Every structure is written in structure tokens, then in C-alpha cells.
Amino acid sequence: MPKRIKYRKTQRGRTKGKAYRGSSLFFGDCGLQACEPTLVTTNQIEAGRVAISHYLKSKGKIWIRMFPDKPITKKPAESRLGKGKGDVATWACVVLPGRIMFEVGGVPKEVALEALRLASHKFSIKTKIICRDVL
């Protein structure tokens, strides 16, 4: 939920191509990388964050490398067609293949792998866990 946006409602757009920005580990030692294009909602981001932080038990550090800045609109139930675009219902983040979604650092490799594995079940896409060579 951005503080300030240029347009209140946006069109869907296309999710094609690969992510070149945000496709390599920058902060942590291990990361969760998307393998398919999708829109990740705020609820999915929060569920992944809770899964990681619950498993780490306040050890280490978590970086969330995506931000929900795309408004998703929805028309009310049982409303007739026309009368304009619906109201903003939720926010989402456009995730392309190769995008690092979460990073974990400051914990042993086995702990980081398990935390990211638990978070990967919160998303409806294929993901893979990548790690730095130097650990």
C-alpha cells in the first residue's frame, strides 16, 4: 500500500519476460526466487513473512524484496455490468521469473533453507531456493 501513487486504478498489463532487476542475492545468504510470472498479493507476502519469522524465532534477518504497488480492483457482488471500474480491493506486486522475493541472513544454511521452504508453500507459483557459494 503505497503512500502516494500517480493513478488510483491501473490496467492489468502483461506479465511476460524475465526479471533482470532484483534477480540476484544482494542482502542475505539465501533467497527465494520465483520461477513463473504472477501477481503476488499482500496476503501472500505477509503469509510468507510470518512463516519465515516464525521458524527463525527472532534470529537472523529477513529482507522482503517485493512491494505491492499495483492496485487490484473488484466490483461488488451481484452488480450489473457498466457503471465504471470497481473500487480498489487489494494491492499486488508483479513478480517475473528470476525475481528474488525473500532473503534470509545471519542464520545457518540449514535453518535458512527450511524457513524459505516453508515460505515457498504460501505462493501459487514454482519457486527455487538459491544460496551464495560462500557460507
Image (cartoon, helix red, strand yellow):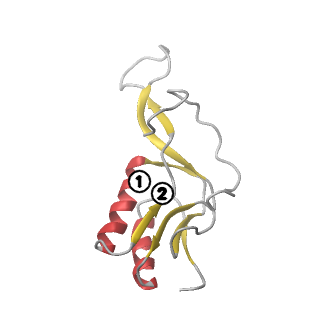
Q: Give the residue at x 56% y 51%.
A: 38
Circle 2 Cα neighbour tier, 10 Å, few/some/many (<14 / 14–19 / ≥20): few
- The residue indicated by pointer 2 is 124
Amino acid at circle 2: Ser
Tag nearer the camera, 1 or 2: 1
Q: Is residue 85 above or below residue 94?
A: above
Q: Is residue 97 found left or right of 118 in the rendered image?
A: right
Q: Position of residue 42 (x, y in %)?
A: 41, 47
Q: Give the residue at x 56% y 66%.
A: 33
Amino acid at circle 1: Gln
Circle 1 Cα neighbour tier, 10 Å, few/some/many (<14 / 14–19 / ≥20): some
Q: Quadrant of residue 104?
A: bottom left
- The residue indicated by pointer 1 is 44
Q: Is residue 57 found left or right of 127 in the rendered image?
A: left
Q: Position of residue 93 (x, y in %)?
A: 52, 47
Q: Position of residue 130 (x, y in %)?
A: 56, 75
Q: Is residue 90 found left or right of 100 in the rendered image?
A: left
23 vs 81, nearest the viewer: 23
Q: Are the residues flagged by discs 1 and 2 in contact, CB closer than 8 Å?
A: yes
Q: Give the residue at x 28% y 73%.
A: 57
Q: Position of residue 60 (x, y in %)?
A: 38, 74
Indicate which disc, 1 or 2, sits on the residue closer to the N terminus: 1
Mark 2 residue element: loop
Mark 1 residue element: helix
Q: Is residue 11 above or below residue 79?
A: below
The Cα atoms of the two marked residues, 1 and 2, are separated by: 9 Å
Q: Is residue 35 above or below residue 116?
A: above
